[in-house]
Amino acid sequence: MPVRADGGLIQTFGLDIRVAILAIAVDTLAFGGTLGSLGALYAVELGAGLVLAVITYKIQRAWYGDDHDPALIKALAIGLLTAIPAPITPILAGPAGLLGLLRLFGGKARSHPR
């Protein structure tokens, strides 16, 4: 995946910190429920992944400033990671959220859509 000069590494791989925190919380809760129910609540985990993907897309567009395609790719990745019945979302969403924080403190964050 090429990194554009105008977007850079942070824009390409970064998540709004609110998305990262939400993704980690939802994945932890959904995985805990699935594990505790011995898989009976897996449909709930799938639904949580879908809802989280929609929320991620909206936040990445409105607050992080991503265009349609990057926001959609990040949203689908977060939704997929949440739907997998293993606690792997924190491994990827955590560092992506830290990149988002770097962007926020670097003064390039936007508070409104284009």
Image (tube, rainbow, N blue to C red):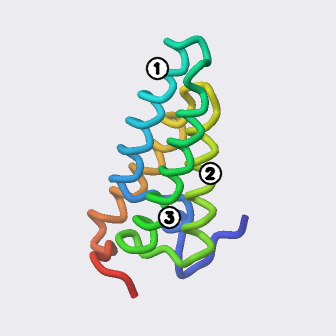
Rendering coords of residue 61 (x, y %): 45, 73
Type of the residue with mark 2: Ala
Query: Which of 14 and 21 lies nearest the eye of the viewer?
Result: 21
Q: Quadrant of residue 5?
A: bottom right
Q: Nearer the viewer, mark 2 or mark 1?
A: 1
User: Mark 1 to mark 3: distance in Å?
Assistant: 25 Å
Type of the residue with mark 3: Tyr
Q: Which residue is mark 3?
A: 57
Q: Is residue 23 left or right of residue 63?
A: right
Q: Identify whether 45 is placed above or below 58.
A: above
Type of the residue with mark 1: Gly
Q: Identify whether 33 is placed above or below 113.
A: above
**Residue with the most extreme bottom position:** 114
Q: Quadrant of residue 47?
A: top right
Rendering coords of residue 3 (x, y %): 64, 70
10 Å neighbourhood of mark 1: few (<14), some, or many (≥20)? Answer: some
Query: Which of 77 and 7 lies nearest the eye of the viewer?
Result: 77
Q: Which residue is mark 1?
A: 32
Label 1 or label 3, whichever comes before in sequence order = 1
The residue positioned 54% from the left and 67% from the top of the image is 71
The residue positioned 42% from the left and 28% from the top of the image is 29
Of helix, strand and loop, which one carries label 3? Answer: helix
Query: Which of 69 and 8 lies nearest the eye of the viewer?
Result: 69
Quadrant including the C terminus: bottom left
Quadrant including the N terminus: bottom right
Q: Which residue is mark 2?
A: 77
Of helix, strand and loop, which one carries label 1? Answer: helix
Label 2 or label 3, whichever comes before in sequence order = 3
